[in-house]
Amino acid sequence: MTERSMKDMQDEVDTYISQFKEGYFSPLAMMARLTEEMGELAREVNHFYGEKPKKNDEEAKTMEQELGDVLFVMICLANSLDIDLDEAFGLVMEKFNTRDKDRWTRIEEDQS
C-alpha cells in the first residue's frame, strides 16, 4: 500500500470531494457522520473484545475499515474548516509533551 502523509491524505480527500457539486457537508452534518462512524467502530470493538458476539447474519467488518471511515470523515471535517491536520497534530503533541509530561509513569530505561 502507498504511504501517504497527512497532507497527501487531505489533498486526496479534497480532490475526491471536489468532483461533486454537493461538496463538503456542513460541519454539523459531518459531526453527526463522525458520531455515526464512531458508533460503528465501537460496535466492532465490542464484538471483538466485548461480550456481545455478532449475529450470524451480520456483515463482517473490520476495525481497520471502521477506523478508515472515521479518518475519512475527520479529514472531510478538517478540510471543510481549512484546518491543516499536520499542524493540529503538532499542537496536540506539544500539549501532551508539556502539560502532561509528568502525568504518566514512564518506562525506565535499562540501567545495565
Image (cartoon, grey):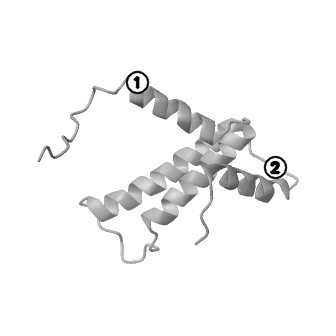
Q: Quadrant of residue 97?
A: top left
Kindly report the distance in space between the C-alpha atoms of the residues bearing marks 2 and 1.
Answer: 38 Å
Q: Residue furthest bottom?
A: 56
**Callout 1 secondary element:** helix
- 22 left or right of 81 in image: right
Q: Amino acid at mark 1?
A: Thr
Residue 29 seen in this snapshot = no
How would you rate the neighbour count of disc 2 (Cα within 10 Å): few for under 14, some for 14-19, many for 20 or more? few
How dense is the environment of label 1, judged by Cα within 10 Å: few (below 14), some, or many (20 and up)? Answer: few
Quarter of the figure with residue 17: bottom right
- Of callouts 2 and 1, the N-terminal one: 2
In percent of the image, x 46 and y 51: which residue is there?
39
Q: Foreground: 6 or 28?
A: 6
Q: Could you tell me which secondary element the residue under label 2 belongs to?
A: loop
Specify the amino acid type for callout 2.
Gly
Residue receiving disc 2: 23
Q: Quadrant of the N terminus?
A: bottom right
- The residue located at (76%, 52%) in the rendering is 14
Residue with the mark numbered 1: 98
Judging depth in this view, the residue of 86 and 41 nearest the camera is: 86
Q: Position of residue 33 (x, y in %)?
A: 60, 48
| 42 to the left or right of 19 | left
Q: Up-down: is 48 above or below 85? A: below
Percent from the top left, x then y, of residue 7? Answer: 68, 49
Q: Identify which residue is drawn at 62% across, 54% down.
A: 5
Q: Is residue 98 above or below residue 6?
A: above
* Residue 93 appears anywhere in the view: yes
